Amino acid sequence: KEVLAIYAAGTLDMGGTVFIHLFGAYFGLAAAWVLGKPTEEDERSAEASPTSDVFSLVGTVFLWIYWPSFNGATAPLGQTQQLLTTANTVMSLCASCMATFAVSAFINGKISTVDI
């Protein structure tokens, strides 16, 4: 799949992150299929707590701060590719965050930090 995406589609993946996340998505779908539907007891015990919400928010902030520089570091040093990779990562983060705010407001009627 990587050869098809890189050579046939002409994509550029600086650190191999697209393919790593693609593998994780397929693995997660396969694991969910093998595990089956959760029981009612599992669904009741899966409620979020204020502590988990805070840790989730802190993790999101760390990703926002460090992910663009991590992606930019995989590009050749001192070339425009490095700047473009970092700028593209920031724009992607902004677009995904705005989309999450919009969907959260549409579904819940308000913006929820838990959705972020």
Image (spheres, grey):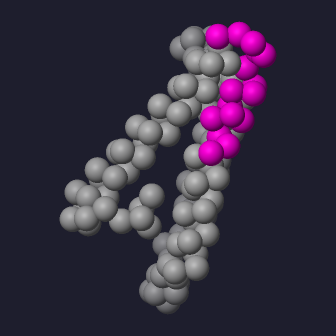
With respect to residue 94, does 15 lie above or below? above
Residue 56 vs residue 28, the one in the foreground: 56
Name the residue at 58% across, 79% down.
51
Q: Position of residue 97 (x, y in %)?
A: 42, 46
In the rendered view, does 85 fall on the left or right side of 43? right
Residue 39 seen in this snapshot:
no
Q: Position of residue 25 (x, y in %)?
A: 58, 47
Mainly helix, strand or loop, the magenta region? helix
Name the residue at 56% across, 31% down.
89
Name the residue at 71% across, 10% down.
79
With respect to residue 35, does 70 lie above or below? above
Q: Which residues are magenta?
A: 65-80
In the rendered view, does 69 fall on the left or right side of 113? right
Determine the image quadrant of residue 22: top right
Q: Is residue 16 magenta?
A: no
Image quadrant where one finds the N terminus = top right
